[in-house]
Amino acid sequence: MRTSTTRLAAGFLGVLIGVVQIVGFAQSNNPNVGTWRANIAKSKFTAGPALKSGTTKIEAAGAGVKYTVDNVSADGSKNHWEFTANYDGKDTPVTGNSPYGDVVALTRVDANTTRMVNKKDGKVTATITSVVSSDGKTRTVTIKGTNVMGQAVDGVTVYERQ
């Protein structure tokens, strides 16, 4: 009886270690993870306030990621917001002063592409699609929709890995 229990415990421990390794491996292979700085010269803002500068830090957090965003608009106004979300499409609260809403839902389109749907008071405001280049050095972020003030936003921001 004692040998069966020991084998069962050893088997469970082996499976647990395997799951932890898989999650860790998946996060280490997430091309979004890193610190990204906006290259304003390569970016294009068709509608809405343009950026003067921007930095996004994306960290592995369990099965998902934690975003920390700091932007300065061309008019000098500053925005800082954060959220931690899984790639499951479920609404997650945003803290800080995001110009796009108070919740975000994050999904993974493919290995290098993520989609973020922003909402304010339950209403979709903006959709942001982020694509990391195959060499992992740049991240191109396309935004379409409105900000929380109801102004149209349409632009492409090119970020470079720091």
Image (cartoon, grey):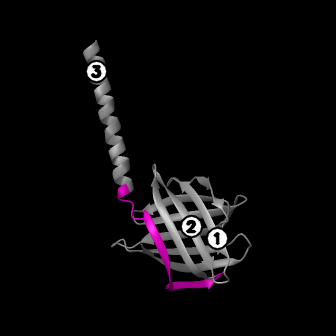
Residues under numbered marks 1 and 2 in contact, where contact means CB atoms less than 8 Å apart: yes
Which residue matches tag 2?
69
Q: Amino acid at mark 3?
A: Thr
Q: How many marks can you see? A: 3
Q: Main secondary structure of the magenta part?
A: strand
Left or right: 160, with 120 as reference point: left
**Which segment did they paint magenta?**
28-49
- Using the image, tell me which numbered label, if any, was put on residue 79: 1
Examine the image and state in which quarter residue 110 appears.
bottom left
The question of residue 51 being in magenta is answered with no
Residue, far top: 1
- Report helix, strand or loop for mark 2: strand
At 59% across and 73% down in the image, what residue appears?
71
Q: Amino acid at mark 1?
A: Asn
User: Considering only order in the chain, which callout, 1 or 3, is on the residue closer to the N terminus?
Assistant: 3
Examine the image and state in which quarter residue 19 appears.
top left
How crowded pointer 1 is (Cα within 10 Å; few <14, some 14-19, many 20+) is rated as: some
Which residue matches tag 3?
6
User: Considering only order in the chain, which callout, 2 or 3, is on the residue closer to the N terminus?
Assistant: 3
User: Considering only order in the chain, which callout, 2 or 1, is on the residue closer to the N terminus?
Assistant: 2
CA separation in Å, label 3 and label 1: 55 Å
